Image: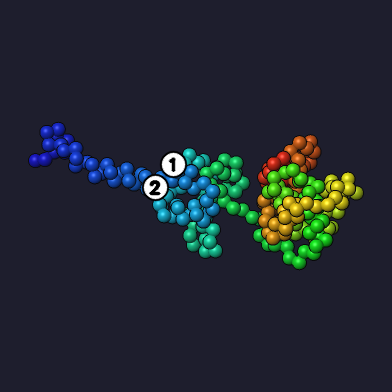
Amino acid sequence: MYNPLDSKSFKPFILLPLLFTIIFLHCSIKVSASNINKNTSHSIYLNFRKHTISLRLLKMNNKLDNRITKLTNSNKDSSKKTLYSIDKNNYTKKISRSITVKKSINKNPVKNTDTSNLDLLARLVKAEAEGQPYKAQVAVAAVVLNRMKSSKFPNSIKSVIYDKSDGHYQFTPTANGFINKKSSSISLKAAKEALQGSDPSNGALYYFDDSTKNKWLLKKPKSIKIGNMIFAY
């Protein structure tokens, strides 16, 4: 009788197909971080769906922690095609180099903005964020629009920018006169982008320089830091 464990009857080549199968399956299901870098959530979804990867295997092969809970397809019918989504509060700092998901809290563009309000918003952007990354400048404009849509603040661009609290202007440029300086092409572009719905601040209502000592501001829940600017709720 043939005994596979018998050294006399054992034929190594019999195990070769099994070995090749194991290697092929391992290569097929492993997704490296470099392969999905800069993908949108939809692209990542398609990769995971194609390879039928479990959450445990995803974490193990990419050395990711428990901050990943679920990844959702970005299509309109995502509720029907849900694998895993990402914990938006914690993932950015830890695995942003592995997975990039486009986020935009302010999805609704501001319509019918006249030239004077656009210029005012652009002047504030320049006064507050000149020299900062372009993304920070868009975020500054977005904060004004987020306030405009919040019940806690006035409901127009001009009234938000010139708003006062306890007799003090909310924005420094309106107090020191920098708001009256001419806008730049970059700040104008950033203001327009925010008005079209872009919001790198992720819905923030406040922003401040990272060198501030203001305890009241520092206690605010942080949204994101861009350049030297911190955006908060």
Q: Which residue in the rendered view is the most extreme toward the front?
A: 185
Q: Nearer the viewer, residue 90 or 102?
A: 102
The residue at 83%/58% (across/down) is 158
Q: How many marks?
A: 2
Residue, far right: 167
* Quadrant housing the N terminus: top left
Give left or right: position of 4 versus 27.
left
- Three-letter code for the amino acid on which mark 2 is drawn: Ile
Marks 2,1: beta carbons within 8 A: yes
- Near mark 1 (Cα within 10 A), the count class, few <14, some 14-19 or many ≥20, is few
What residue did someone put label 2 on?
A: 29
The image position of residue 70, as x and y in percent, is 51, 51
Q: Which mark is residue 173?
A: none
Figure coloring: rainbow
Position of residue 21 measured from the top left corner of the image (x, y, whole percent): 29, 46
Identify residue type, mark 1: Asn
In this rendering, the answer to whether 155 lies above or below 126 is below
Q: Is residue 165 visible?
A: no
Callout 1: SS:
helix
Find residue 152 and report its horizontal and vertical position in percent.
79, 55
Residue at 49% over, 48% down? 36
Residue 58 versus residue 211 in the image, above or below: below
At 32% from the left edge and 46% from the top edge, which residue is drawn? 24
Q: Quadrant of residue 192?
A: bottom right
Question: Helix, strand, or loop for circle 2?
Answer: helix
Q: Tell which residue pokes out farthest to the top in this image.
A: 7
Residue of label 1: 61
What residue lies at 39% left-to-right and 47% top-to-bottom? 29
Q: Position of residue 27 (x, y in %)?
A: 37, 45
